[in-house]
Image (cartoon, rainbow, N blue to C red):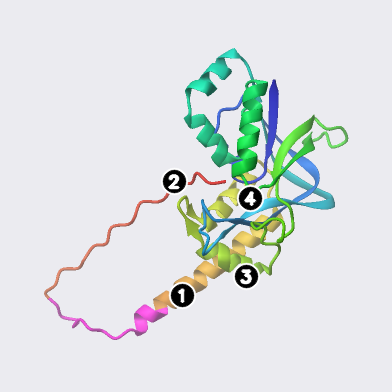
Amino acid sequence: MVFWVFGYGSLVWNPGFEYDEKVIGFVKNYRRVFDLACIDHRGTPEHPARTCTLEEVEGSVCWGAAYCVRGGPEKEKASMAVSVVLFSIWLRHVCLSCVVDLFLIYFQYLERRECEYDQKTLVDFFKEGESEEPLLTGVIVFTSTPDKISNKYYLGPAPLEEMAKQIATAFGPCGNNRDYLFSLEKAMSDIGHEDEYVIELANEVRKVLGVVGLVLKEKKLSSPKHVPLQSSLSPIKLACLPEAIPMDS
């Protein structure tokens, strides 16, 4: 059995699973938007992060990467022996179709656990320079229902400045929300298909970070000096905290 999945978010630069083939291309009539909440990777329930999902827009295209996993006896045996694969699949929103029975188990597991992406859609996948006929059909892509009532993780659109403030300040077990955005910006540039929406949002986040940094600096400069200029105390060196390793969706 052969399984294809289209990645348009962190899967573009960090699939997190072994694959047999990767193809850069696009899907039609969808665009990438940061309208989905993340409360367990780059955010928390109290301060959710914003991650990307797909919005149906006639005439739009969304570039990304399609990954292929081909089944076989060796992969079936490996997938049953290494339980960590299941955890990786859950984290990355990807099914590994080694055999039909395992595929169904994985898919059901994803449906129970991946409530943020409550839709699994089959799409046509197009390769660069071949926009008339799809290279692949029946490629799975994880999306979300754009309705705040039926999908509690759907945040919906917001003004650019508001989204930027949320992304600039949100963080969770897997790191900062802004790093997710900046990594996606770089990943799209690396594959030769920059996303103007992502660039605009990333630049707005940088503005917010600059303002926050300026405010903190001004507060530090204007604060009363409790320690005399002439002091025998040795300066204290602060060690930087280690950076979080991103493993998010």
**Which residue is at a point 63% across and 46% down the rendered structure image?**
9
State how far apart marks 3 and 1 are (Cα).
19 Å
Image coordinates of residue 133 in percent, x first then y, are 87, 32
Residue designated by label 2: 245
Image coordinates of residue 151 in percent, x first then y, are 69, 55
Judged by its main secondary structure, the magenta piece is loop
Earlier in the chain: of badge 1 and badge 2, it is 1
Q: Is residue 140 left or right of residue 12?
A: right
Count of numbered circles in the view? 4
Earlier in the chain: of badge 2 and badge 3, it is 3
Residue designated by label 1: 214
Which residue is most to the top? 73
State how far apart marks 2 and 3 are (Cα).
26 Å
Image coordinates of residue 226 in percent, x first then y, are 22, 83
Any magenta on residue 224? yes
Residue designated by label 4: 116
Identify the secondary structure beneath mark 2.
loop
Q: Are marks 1 and 2 in contact (CB under 8 Å)?
A: no
Tell me which amino acid carries mark 4.
Answer: Glu
Disc 3 crowd rating (10 Å Cα; few below 14, some 14-19, many 20+) is: some
Tell me which amino acid carries mark 3.
Answer: Glu
Residue 69 visible, this orientation: yes
**Which residue is at a point 45% across and 52% down the rendered structure image?**
173
Earlier in the chain: of badge 4 and badge 3, it is 4
Tell me which amino acid carries mark 2.
Answer: Ile
* Residue 232 quadrant: bottom left
Residue designated by label 3: 162
